[in-house]
């Protein structure tokens, strides 16, 4: 039986790859983008199997209308993918209020609005699967990306709570946490804060050659395996390297907590 997908940020990157992967195997997709012409080719190829919608995910009213339209058009929603997002580069001191608010609106509030709009439909039909595209940046932090990290940590936080809240309704939830891929995240889609010279020495010290980046197309089989699983994971890395990085990161956290445990215990009181 074919599945019905709802994908934000579907015009490029992971969203485009997953839209095409779903359509190629006979599934149907509601594909969201801010561009009115982003899906001309898929529409010509797949016809009524794709419903393209021009929607800004920061507009809660428009998001709710799009989710309702998709459910009405295809009769149900099986997989809801929150993929829309971008990177904000800059030290914490450098980013502007507008940059920060825009980052959180897209990366955190956008998925929240889609999730809230989709849940009544998934609950009524007795199940479904919500996929939140997070990042390795949602589980550890690097300098120069502080507010991007904040948006992804927020997504991880509410999604972990969501998974427990909706389990009894038959709704599955997965956080996809990619490593570095050749998407627009660090390219045309990125926003860069104006650099302050006070951080020039730090930037120079932390500069390192860009590592090999993954092929977004290689994630097609992986995402299909996740959505087809009877018991999909709450969290899954995509790419090479994240597991080793996070093992080291969490070992360091535990060691520090243990080193300060005596102070922690004393802080409880008698």
Image (spheres, rainbow, N blue to C red):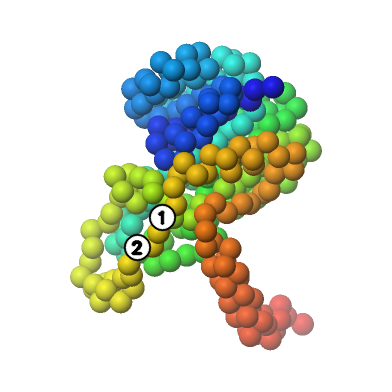
Res 75 quadrant in image: top right
Label 1 to label 2, Cα distance in Å? Answer: 8 Å
Dot 2: element = loop
In the rendered structure, the answer to whether residue 106 lies left or right of residue 186 reads: right
Where's residue 267, x and y in %? 67, 80
Q: Along the line of sight, which residue is nearer the eye, 265 or 260? A: 260
What residue lies at 43% left-to-right and 22% top-to-bottom?
42
Furthest residue to the right? 168
Where's residue 121, x and y in %? 65, 25
Res 16 quadrant in image: top left
Quadrant where the image shows the N terminus: top right
Furthest residue to the left? 197
The answer to whether marks 1 and 2 mark residues whose Cβ atoms lie closer than 8 Å is yes
What residue lies at 68% left-to-right and 28% top-to-bottom?
122
The crowding category of the residue bearing disc 1, from other C-alpha atoms within 10 Å (few below 14, some 14 to 19, many at least 20), is few
Location of mark 1 (residue): 213
Q: Along the line of sight, which residue is nearer the eye, 181 or 117? A: 181
What residue lies at 66% left-to-right and 82% top-to-bottom?
258
Where's residue 205, x and y in %? 30, 77
Location of mark 2 (residue): 210
Quadrant where the image shows the C terminus: bottom right
Up the image or down, 133 lies above or below 8; here it is below
Dot 1: element = loop
Up the image or down, 193 lies above or below 207; here it is above
Q: Along the line of sight, which residue is nearer the eye, 81 or 167? A: 81
Up the image or down, 34 lies above or below 173; here it is above
The crowding category of the residue bearing disc 2, from other C-alpha atoms within 10 Å (few below 14, some 14 to 19, many at least 20), is few
């Amino acid at each position: 039986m074919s599945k019905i997908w709802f994908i934000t940020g579907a015009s490029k990157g992971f969203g485009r790859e997953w839209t095409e992967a779903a359509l190629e195997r006979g599934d149907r997709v509601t594909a969201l983008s801010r561009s009115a012409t982003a899906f001309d080719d898929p529409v010509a190829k797949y016809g009524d199997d794709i419903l393209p919608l021009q929607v800004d995910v920061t507009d809660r009213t428009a998001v709710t209308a799009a989710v309702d339209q998709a459910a009405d058009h295809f009769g149900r929603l099986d997989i809801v993918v929150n993929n829309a997002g971008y990177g904000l580069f800059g030290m914490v001191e450098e980013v502007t209020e507008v940059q920060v608010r825009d980052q959180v609106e897209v990366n955190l509030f956008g998925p929240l609005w889609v999730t809230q709009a989709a849940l009544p439909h998934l609950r009524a039909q007795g199940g479904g699967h919500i996929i939140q595209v997070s990042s390795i940046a949602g589980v550890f932090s690097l300098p120069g990306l502080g507010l991007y990290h904040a948006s992804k940590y927020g997504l991880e936080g509410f999604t972990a709570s969501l998974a427990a809240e909706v389990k009894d309704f038959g709704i599955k939830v997965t956080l996809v946490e990619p490593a570095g891929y050749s998407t627009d995240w660090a390219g045309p889609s990125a926003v860069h804060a104006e650099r302050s010279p006070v951080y020039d020495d730090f930037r120079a010290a932390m500069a390192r050659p860009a590592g090999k980046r993954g092929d977004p197309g290689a994630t097609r089989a992986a995402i299909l395996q996740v959505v087809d699983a009877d018991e999909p994971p709450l969290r899954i890395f995509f790419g090479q390297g994240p597991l080793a990085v996070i093992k080291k990161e969490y070992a360091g956290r535990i060691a520090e907590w243990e080193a300060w445990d005596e102070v922690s215990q004393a802080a409880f009181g008698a």
